[in-house]
Image (tube, helix red, strand yellow):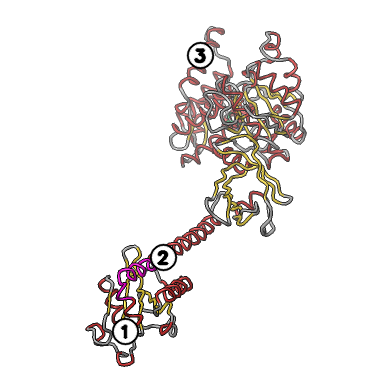
Amino acid sequence: MYDLSCISDTVQKYANITAEIAKVDVEVVNFKLIRVAGTGIFSEDVNKDVSENSHVYKHAIKTGKRQIIYEPRKDIKCKNCKIKDECKETFEISTPIIMNDEIIGVIGMACSNEKSRDVIVNNLDSYLAFLEQISDFIVTKAHEDEEEKSKVAMFDMLKIIIRSMDEGAIIINKNGNVDTINPSAKRQLGIKRIINNEHIDITETGDMVNNSKEYRIKIGENVDTVIGDIFDIPENPVYKHVLLFKDLKGIQSEIYAMTSTVNTLNSENIVGSSQATKKLKEEIKKISDSFSTVLITGESGSGKEVVATAIWQNSDRRKNRFVAINCAAIPEPLLESELFGYVKGAFTGADPTGKIGKFELANNGVIFLDEIGDMPIYLQSKLLRVIQNKKITRIGSNQVIPLDVRIIAATNKNLKEMITQNKFREDLYYRLNVIPVEIPPLRERKEDIVDLIFYFIHYYRKLFGKNFIKIEQETMKKLVEYPWYGNVRELENTVEFMVNMMEDGIVDNNAIPINIRKHSSNSDTKRNDKTGGIKTLKELEQNEIKKAIEHFGDTTEGKASAAKALGIGIATLYRKL
Ligand SMILES: Nc1ncnc2c1ncn2[C@@H]1O[C@H](COP(=O)(O)OP(=O)(O)OP(=O)(O)O)[C@@H](O)[C@H]1O
């Protein structure tokens, strides 16, 4: 319940006015019967408990009704009053003070002589109305006080919430200075010092991204671009706005975390011991720290993205982002906005919130333009301009954003041939092909096949919690001879299948997918067709030795019997095995 003591100064003023006008003594008590204000005979004992002598007030509080005592001391309500004998009152009115249907106190008016009693009694209605009015004034002030307090409490709460928010928040006062800045805002803006009433400059860049406006903020020497909203604080004498924001870098990181699926391999992790792969790893090391554009060519699945990420990982740009975009996977009309981003309202059909493009996301890092051969010719011109000017503009915006991005492009198409067909711009080709990197198909680096098979077997065996003992030689041979038109991607999928199929930790021909089995039996048949079914002596020998071992067993005794049956010495058998 509201305590009138909180506005005792105002209540005292009203008591004084009432006393002055009505020529009476006035007292106001709160609901606990503490004297909040008093004049004349009541001016002593302000702030003291007067419950012992307040029998009439207790009645007014209990009933909620005004009490008029025409004959103090004789009135029944004065019966138990302890100071009855000293009481000099000649007349008394007690009016309850009611706020929100609760009795928060009583205003009492008392006469101490017959003259003033007569004046009041003769004009009783007017005096009663006057007292009601004073009671209403007190209640109005109590309401205002309560509202003010709740505003202050709300602001205190707001400041507590703001302090713990992940989003940056700044409360700005009427002078355009920082009143409150939360830790997240300081972190995002790179401010380490204590901000005390410093001036803040906020200007709109004119772009809208992620459904919020972009602002440039300046506090002292700290300048940053943020994306957020400004809210006005209405009817407040101290505070003007609250700015809630995320800085652009934070938003970019969120988008990157949501969209990036980059495997981070460095050149050491690239699997393969073939000459070609060794040379590739050396090349990666050499070109990583350069700024020059790289064009990686190779068949689909041969590891172009792996090489691109390795270049990034080996360079000092590895601290910044690697942003990949597959130019063939994104519908042509959307590719431009994916690459360069756009602002709210840039074009019909665009996401109305605006979007940050891949180039901007990759700023200070690396952009990987996969399947560059599929980029439409008009965009090729735009890309060329971006490479030359090192600047981009979001679609629909006037803002020029400076770029420091290393471009790595990749293709499995023959760009030179596309140039002759006017499908690829020659000038762009030379801009991209500053450092050409060629990845040979997997079938041309057979040593890598063996390395990759073991690498993927161990990877998937761990993933599926399976035990691996060995891969049969014959099976390995089939896999090495298979042409792998889908390159490493096809090989990886095949090994995943085989690890699923293998029994008792042994990968044998039964685990090979049907297409590869068919391929190797076709090539056997083709060879038989060419040779009239005649086997080489070496093949005959191999078959007979295999048959003998299968028949007698792979033990020492078995091998001795096999050698005997084959008509050769045990040492020769061991050598041939
Ligand atoms: N040398 C390698 N070591 C380990 N994994 C590799 C290697 N080369 C390729 N891979 C794996 O093979 C798969 C295909 O590689 P990647 O995506 O780099 O090929 P790509 O040439 O970019 O394919 P596409 O032309 O279809 O885009 C990936 O899962 C990748 O991790």
Cα–Cα gap, marks 1 and 3: 127 Å
Q: Residue 25 sits in which quadrant? A: bottom left
- Answer few, some or many: residues within 10 Å of disc 3's Cα (few below 14, many 20 plus, some between 14 and 19): few
Numbered disc in front, either 1 or 3: 1
- The residue lying toward the viewer, choosing from 37 and 159, is 37
Q: Could you say whether the residue bearing mark 2 is in a helix, strand or loop?
A: helix
Q: Residue at x 34, y 62 (%)?
A: 100
2 and 3 marks in contact (CB < 8 Å): no
Q: Amino acid at mark 2?
A: Phe
- The residue lying toward the viewer, choosing from 18 and 175, is 18
Cα–Cα gap, marks 1 and 2: 27 Å
Q: Amino acid at mark 1?
A: Thr
Q: Which contiguous range is marked in magenta?
A: 120-135
- Residue 570 visible? The answer is no
Decide if residue 272 is on the left or right side of residue 12.
right
Cα–Cα gap, marks 2 and 3: 105 Å
Decide if residue 219 is on the left or right side of residue 351.
right
Numbered label attached to residue 345: none
**Is residue 135 depicted above or below 55 in this figure?**
above
> Which is more N-terminal, label 3 or label 1?
1
Whole-percent x, y for residue 302 in the image: 62, 25
Q: Residue at x 60, y 56 (%)?
A: 180
Assign the magenta stretch its main secondary structure.
helix
> Which is more N-terminal, label 2 or label 1?
1
Whole-percent x, y for residue 385 in the image: 73, 23
Residue 375 sits inside the magenta stretch: no
Q: Amino acid at mark 3?
A: Asn
Numbered disc in front, either 2 or 3: 2
The response on whether ligand 1 sits within 8 Å of label 1 is no
Numbered disc in front, either 1 or 2: 1
User: What residue is shown with label 2?
Assistant: 137
